[in-house]
Image (spheres, helix red, strand yellow):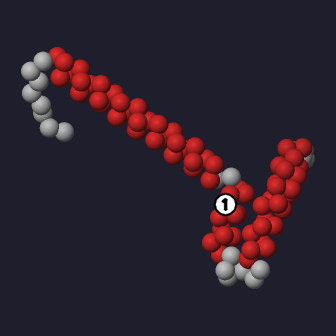
Amino acid sequence: MTNRIYTSYSQIDRDLEMLKIEKEISYEKLIFGVKKTKDNLVPQNIVTDLISKYSSAIPYGSIVSTAIPFVINKIFPAVKTWFKNRKRGG
């Protein structure tokens, strides 16, 4: 950042306003990136992405890539419930 010589307070105010807006934009970009990352870390999305990348190597890849999200939606809630309801330490 270069040193700047200001001749009036209005120039300082203008630069401060620009910096404030740049800060808000950067913050919103960060929030958007976090939300996008959070959405991509869902097990269903991870498996779907993996299958879509390797569907050409998997026989009947299109059928598998269609069936996997359905299976995940049925199995993961059951597994989650099982972990929540099981007794600990004994």
Tell me what residue is drawn at x 67 percent, y 80 percent. 56
Tell me what residue is drawn at x 72 percent, y 80 percent. 58
Between 81 and 36, the one nearer to me in the picture: 36
Image position of 37 with respect to 23: above or below: below
Q: Does residue 4 show up?
A: yes
Tell me what residue is drawn at x 52 percent, y 42 percent. 32
- 86 relative to 12 in the view: left or right: right
Q: Secondary structure at mark 1?
A: helix
Check disc 1 and report the residue beneath it: 46
Count up the numbered dots. 1
Quarter holding the N terminus?
Answer: top left
**To which quarter of the image does residue 6 belong?**
top left
Type of the residue with mark 1 = Ile
Q: Position of residue 27 (x, y in %)?
A: 44, 36
Image position of 82 with respect to 47: above or below: above
Q: Does residue 89 show up?
A: no
Tell me what residue is drawn at x 68 percent, y 58 percent. 45
Between 21 and 30, the one nearer to me in the picture: 21
Image position of 40 with respect to 47: above or below: above
Between 24 and 41, the one nearer to me in the picture: 24
- 20 relative to 3 in the view: left or right: right
Dot 1 crowding, Cα within 10 Å, few <14, some 14–19, many 20+: few
Between 66 and 49, the one nearer to me in the picture: 66
Q: Position of residue 72 (x, y in %)?
A: 80, 59
Q: Position of residue 66 (x, y in %)?
A: 78, 67
